Image (cartoon, helix red, strand yellow):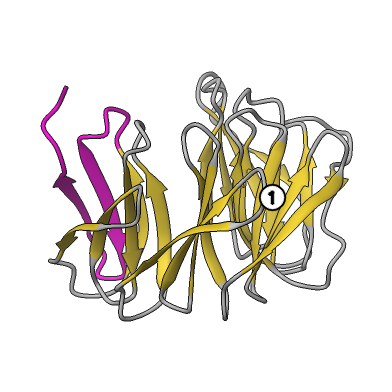
Amino acid sequence: MLALAFSPDRTWLASGSVDKTIRLWPLSGDPKPKVVERHTHHVTSLAFRPDGSLLASGSLDCTLLVGKPGADEPPASLSTRNTPVVCLSFHPQGKLLAAGYTDGSITLWDVEEKREVRTFNGHCGVVRSVAFAPDGSVLASAGDDQRVVLWNAGEGSQVGLLQGHEQAVTSVAWSPDGATIATGSFDKTVRLWEASGALKEVLTGHEYGVLSIAFCPCGCTVASGSADRTVRLWRVQAPK
């Protein structure tokens, strides 16, 4: 299993797998999942639109598909390039979707008009994680080049660069208030940054690479998942 996403309306837990399928697990009622076969290779990424009306999925088959979760109608195809999709993030307003690719690029898609808005080029190597700031003004992207790039989401210009990790950066996440950025890396560390790009703290303890990062809803705790088979919880600020 390579990707998980909860629907905002708490109807589904979506999972994407190396078996090429997406499974929609009901969060109430019949526990039997609905199996969706829309890709021909590993499903690498999933993202629900903030209102829950659409589910986007990316795959190593180079497709980016968007459709209504649970519906029988075929999804719309957005990506027209011959490049595997690695990561996805919806803009908080739900109209735009960011996709990171193996060629180091990030493309912003309009899911309503089904068109490409712009492409960001600033990474050398795979883009492993993308995340919009809570207000949607900045897009953060993390990659194999050990960097996190901050982009003006509206203009496409680079507005910040986070450097310090010693291996590929696998995951990036914003705190709910947008003041802090957390990153995880194959170098076994979690790093906390000011939104301005200044390094706040380096968290160590994992024995192998960090693969995923998430903030709790209150922003006081960061969770990190690692190849060492552990999940660690880090208190980053006092609960409000």
Q: Secondary structure at mark 1?
A: strand
Report whether 112 appears left or right of 146: right
Q: Is residue 18 above or below residue 150?
A: below
Query: Residue 164: where, in percent of width, then height?
Result: 29, 73
Q: Residues within 10 Å of mark 1 (few under 14, many from 20)?
A: many
Q: Is residue 1 visible?
A: no
Report whether 53 appears left or right of 238: right
Residue at left offset 66%, top offset 43%: 154
Figure quadrant of residue 97: top right
Residue 235 on the magenta span: yes
Residue at left offset 31%, top offset 70%: 227
Q: Which residue is mark 1?
A: 57
Q: Is residue 222 visible?
A: yes
Q: Range of the magenta residues?
A: 216-240
Given residues 113 and 23, the one toward you in this image is: 113
Quadrant the C terminus occupies: top left
Query: Residue 105: where, in percent of width, then height?
Result: 66, 68
Residue at left offset 28%, top offset 54%: 193
Query: Residue 26: where, in percent of width, then height?
Result: 56, 28
Query: Residue 203: where, in percent of width, then height?
Result: 16, 61
Figure quadrant of residue 79: bottom right
Residue at left offset 34%, top offset 31%: 177
Disc tally is 1
Q: Amino acid at mark 1?
A: Ser
